[in-house]
Image: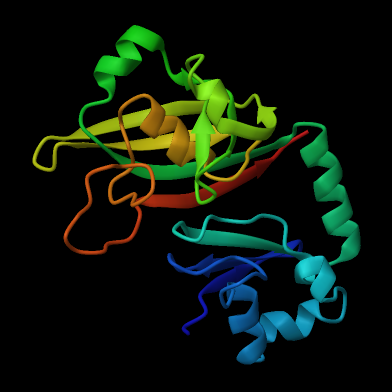
Amino acid sequence: MNIVYYEDEYCFYVRKPAGIPTTYGKEKSFLEYLIDEDHYIIKVLKSEFDQEEEYGLLNRLDNATSWLLYFAKSKKIKDEYKKLQQEGFVKKFYLLEVYWDIQYWIRENGRCIDYPIAHHKYEKDRMVVIKTEQDKEKWELRLHHLKTEILESFWCGDRQTTILLVFIQKWIRHQIRSHFSSIGYPIVWDDIYWKKKDPQKWNLQLFSVGLLVKK
């Protein structure tokens, strides 16, 4: 695997390809690829962290999501990041492409999607967005009250899709994917939250593009 990364005094910023889990589980994860290749990044991080600490990993991405993972270079940096995250000072930005012209929805509803989300009671590979009384019968564990905010949008007439820049502060599994699907604008090539299946398998058009830590 070709490892693409950038580093500064605080972190390593490493590109995770789509289709690979971030960390340990049933399938081979991106962390394991780094270890197998004995990459320079892992050599540095092993001096500070162990496997249980995920070698300083600060964020996770859905298997189908591509772009940047952040690794703290020291335990002090990781602890400070987690503290700022709990206090609400960490913001994440994503670039995505959804089917159809979402401007219609924005004009009627504004730029914030704030429906509660929970793990699906019957379909373990997905989350459920709670919009109706019927939806309440499908959720288990606990309800997460989250917001997905649309910052910028660009209509692609030739593709009949909209490119979006969105921001989230608190996040859970599949938050962006399930939120946009719930309002009728699923992410392009999302094989979980879009009922129409493409004959070819393509990468989900959702990318982690930035992280802002500001106090």
Residue 43 is left or right of residue 36, and the answer is right
Considering every residue shown, the one lying at the far top of the view is: 108
- Residue 146: name its quadrant: top right
Q: Residue at (40%, 49%) from the top-left corner?
A: 206
Residue 59 is left or right of residue 135, and the answer is right
- Does the rendering let one see residue 169? no
Depicted 194 relative to depicted 207: above or below: above
Residue 158 is left or right of residue 147, and the answer is left
- Does the rendering let one see residue 61? yes
Q: Position of residue 93 (x, y in %)?
A: 52, 41
Q: Position of residue 169 (x, y in %)?
A: 64, 33
Q: Residue at (55%, 66%) from the top-left corner?
A: 21
Q: Residue at (52%, 44%) from the top-left corner?
A: 174
Q: Residue at (56%, 74%) from the top-left corner?
A: 27
Q: Position of residue 205 (x, y in %)?
A: 34, 51
Q: In front here: 65 or 129?
A: 129
